[in-house]
Image (cartoon, rainbow, N blue to C red):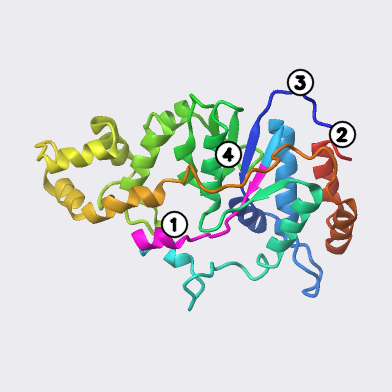
Amino acid sequence: MAPDPSRPHKLLLLDSASLYFRAFYGVPDQRTNDSEPPVNALRGFLDMISTLVTAHSPTHLVACWDDDWRPQWRVDLVPTYKTHRLTEGSDTAEESPDDLTPQVPVIREALAAVGIARIGVPECEADDVIGTLATRHHGVMPVDVVTGDRDLLQLVDDEHEVRVLYTGKGGVREPDVFTAAALAEKYGVPTGDAYLDMSVLRGDTSDGLPGVKGIGDKTAAALIAEYGSLAGLRTAVDDGDPAIKGARRANLEAAADYLDVAPRVVRVVRDADVPDADLALPAEVADRLALDELAARYGIENPVGRLLTALGLD
């Protein structure tokens, strides 16, 4: 079924690892014995795409990939970056559940067989692929980013029609839709850039980013609102603003080295070397034989069927 040329274009960018980890923990493992391959993340991920395509009617879709989940250039700036996620005894391997690891290459195979674009870039996280593609499509088409990672809220941009569908609580069926108004309501910051500044101050223990001692969401948002940006706040500290005093001044001064480098770590790359690719929803199944073999081998005929129906390829 060919895409409808009259349909308004929309790009859906998937933070793939965020979604398949969620699928792994959210979809029951229904194997009857351990000799069968695990498929719960695979099933769940395919069903997530079906749900998203049906609910949001994108014309273009990319499964964005972590070719490097912990780029060395970020570690060089903040050595604690994601250290707690490392496999014991390794400097590079991410800790992953034993039953999830073998499902990831099968997810890749399924995407390729269906014909859904999957893009990763050396030395870049999926976040950087998402940031680059969102920026590249400013003014071309609206962009929805699907993720369970709050870091990507920095991409919210009403002017360029970039929203974030945050799956933290409601999953892909009922995501929190973040626009500038939603950012202001939830976090007290007016833009994605302001959210980035706030998140640097606040830090993120899940990423090994310490933040500034004593500063959480509300205080960080208030400081950004008062001084306009992280740069404005730091200038005020350096200039001896009398309103910044006591423990707050001491903590901001003590965090100076961290604040020098953290924005570069937290900020997603907007100009990564993402290759040109056809991002349009497939007009036909890319490899029907391979898809049928995968479906039979892993017993995923139903989720594959639902995905093809959502894509208009059944």
Q: What is the C-alpha distance between the residues marked 2 and 4?
A: 25 Å
Does the segment drawn in magenta span residue 295?
Answer: no
Q: Amino acid at mark 4?
A: Val
Q: Nearer the viewer, mark 1 or mark 2?
A: 2
Secondary structure beneath label 1 = helix
Crowd band around label 4 with a 10 angstrom C-alpha radius: few (<14), some (14–19), many (20+): many
* Residue occupied by mark 4: 145
Residue 183 coordinates in the image, percent (x, y): 44, 32
Q: Quadrant of the C terminus?
A: top right
Outermost residue to the bottom: 89
Q: Amino acid at mark 3?
A: Ser
Q: Nearer the viewer, mark 2 or mark 4?
A: 2
Secondary structure beneath label 2 = loop
Q: What is the C-alpha distance between the residues marked 4 and 3?
A: 23 Å
Q: Is residue 226 above or below residue 29?
A: above
Q: What is the C-alpha distance between the residues marked 2 and 3?
A: 14 Å
Q: Amino acid at mark 1?
A: Ser
**Is residue 78 in view?**
no
Q: What is the C-alpha distance between the residues marked 1 and 2?
A: 43 Å
Residue 35 coordinates in the image, percent (x, y): 80, 75
* Residue occupied by mark 1: 206
Q: Quadrant of the N terminus?
A: top right
Residue 71 coordinates in the image, percent (x, y): 47, 60
* Residue occupied by mark 3: 6
Q: Which residue is at a point 42% across and 29% down the rendered structure image?
A: 185
- Would you identify the image quadrant in which residue 218 lies? top left
Q: Which residues are magenta?
A: 62-78
Secondary structure beneath label 3 = loop
* Residue occupied by mark 2: 1
Crowd band around label 1 with a 10 angstrom C-alpha radius: few (<14), some (14–19), many (20+): few
